[in-house]
Amino acid sequence: MQQIPLRIKRLSPHAIVPQYQSEHAAGMDLHAAIEDAITLEPGEISPVPCGFAMELPVGYEAQIRPRSGLACKYGITVPNAPGTIDADYRGQVIVALINLSKESFVIEPKMRIAQMVVSQVTKCEIQEVDTLEETVRGAGGFGSTGQ
């Protein structure tokens, strides 16, 4: 398995450095770097700081994804999933969370709130053309290939 350097700078004494929870985990857990609990009401979106900034290598991105346990058990997810952090961003990592349940949810200090997957980025060479190759599917949109 390839390893790349990921430089982390703590911005808050409440920050927990992202870490993998198992040997083959694809994502690192992100924690709430907050001093006091945040109550997320049904339908509410709240930015939750993680208390660190990072330096991704050029050619990589970090994707912020929901934690399956929070999503399945409590309806807490990331509304822009996956959120993307570009290699040239040096600000604090902040996770937007939304409460899709009908109950209030309390985000506790240091709680694991999301996961971060670092992936290689492929850049495209944009070519504007007058025609595209034909395919069997053609311009068939949502649901056009069956259920």
Image (cartoon, grey):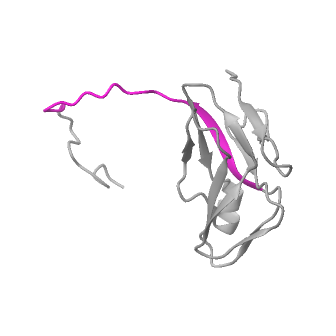
Q: How many marks?
A: 0
Task: List x then y, in percent, for residue 88.
Answer: 57, 33
**Left or right of 127 on screen, residue 32:** right
What residue is drawn where x is 58% and y is 74%? 43
Which residue is nearer to you in this view: 33 or 143?
Answer: 33
The N terminus sits in image quarter: top right
* Residue that protrudes farthest toward the left in the picture: 130
Relative vertical location of residue 25 with respect to residue 145 in this rendering, above or below: above
Task: List x then y, in percent, for residue 78.
Answer: 59, 57
Q: Is residue 132 magenta?
A: yes
What residue is drawn where x is 25% and y is 27%? 127
Relative vertical location of residue 71 with respect to residue 92 in this rendering, above or below: below
Relative vertical location of residue 102 with respect to residue 63 in this rendering, above or below: below
Which residue is nearer to you in this view: 13 or 147?
Answer: 13
**Left or right of 76 on screen, residue 32:** right
Task: List x then y, in percent, for residue 38.
Answer: 75, 69
Quadrant of residue 102 within the rendered picture: bottom right
Quadrant of residue 62 within the rendered picture: top right
Relative vertical location of residue 62 with respect to residue 75 in this rendering, above or below: above
Which residue is nearer to you in this view: 67 or 60?
Answer: 60
Q: Which residues are magenta?
A: 112-133
What residue is drawn where x is 23% and y is 42%? 137
* Residue that protrudes farthest toward the top in the picture: 2
Quadrant of residue 34 within the rendered picture: bottom right
Which residue is nearer to you in this view: 24 or 36?
Answer: 36
Task: List x then y, in percent, for residue 92.
Answer: 68, 46
The C terminus sits in image quarter: bottom left
